[in-house]
Amino acid sequence: MKIIKFTVGSLETNCYILQTDQCFAVIDPGALSPPLTQYLKNTSLICSYIILTHNHYDHIGAVNPLKQMFSSAHIVMHHQDYIHLGNPLYTGEILFGQKVKKFHTDIVVNSETELLMMADKSNQQVKVELIHTPGHTAGGISVRVGPNLFTGDTLFKQGIGRCDLPSGDINKLCHSIKKYYSWGVNYQVFPGHGPNTSLDQETESLNYYCPDFFD
């Protein structure tokens, strides 16, 4: 599987393409930058999923045009964030003066969920795991694919997601990040903003943001 990263929109959101030789999934299409648009127009692959780590406008802004381009793609979001779509207070639209047209979600996640992507012509499949990681929002999810972890706005390089917006909770956020470490793997971290990192690289900063994190 190939990971392609596009930085899009005014808040420089990281949008990721998970690509096999038959299909691809999009994580957090916050906007359509020229490089992302070119990729989407030129690809001959099937778009299987549009995965949304949470409902903030800078992560969902291009869902509607993307769905128009790839009508068979399944939009995926956690139930606790889906119920607030269309509420500009919860999506951050009112705070930043933005507007996102509401859309229908095809797969509503309520618990840990596994998606499958066709990997090659021998019918091998890539397992895409969705884990509920609330804190930045109530319905935040992280995406685990092999040794790679897509954390949305839960964990950044030398930072964590803000918790002062509606449905945010610092205690839940720290608990969600602890869940990452409970798996005992030094995952490569692909955050919703900023550069990539790894779990091992973030141990020192987490003791600052979540006191006594590793006690």
Image (cartoon, rainbow, N blue to C red):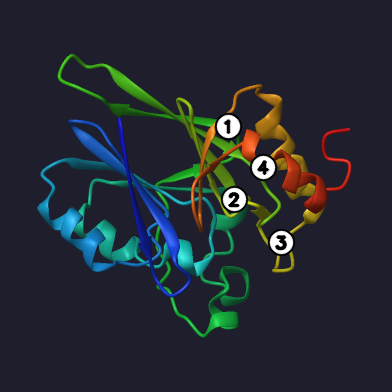
The answer for how far apart the CA atoms under marks 2 and 3 are is 23 Å
The answer for how far apart the CA atoms under marks 2 and 1 are is 25 Å
* SS assignment at label 2: loop
* SS assignment at label 4: helix
Which numbered disc, 1 or 3, marks the residue that appears first in the sequence?
1
Picture quarter containing residue 32?
bottom left
Q: Nearer the viewer, mark 2 or mark 3?
A: 2
Give the residue pinned by disc 3: 167
* Left or right: 55 as drawn, with respect to 27: right
CB atoms at circles 2 and 1 under 8 Å apart? no
Depth check, front residue: 131 or 13: 13
The answer for how far apart the CA atoms under marks 2 and 4 are is 7 Å
Amino acid type at mark 3: Ser
Q: Position of residue 181 (x, y in %)?
A: 69, 30
Amino acid type at mark 2: Lys
Which numbered disc, 4 or 3, marks the residue that appears first in the sequence?
3
Amino acid type at mark 1: Glu
Which numbered disc, 2 or 1, marks the residue that appears first in the sequence?
1
73 w.r.t. 1: above or below: below
Tell me if mark 3 has few (under 14), some (14-19) or many (20+) residues whose alpha carbon lies within 10 angstroms of its own. some
Tell me if mark 1 has few (under 14), some (14-19) or many (20+) residues whose alpha carbon lies within 10 angstroms of its own. few
CB atoms at circles 2 and 4 under 8 Å apart? yes
Give the residue pinned by disc 2: 157
Q: Position of residue 156 (x, y in %)?
A: 60, 51
Give the residue pinned by disc 4: 202
> What label does residue 112 carry, if any?
1
Depth check, front residue: 23 or 36: 36
CB atoms at circles 2 and 3 under 8 Å apart? no
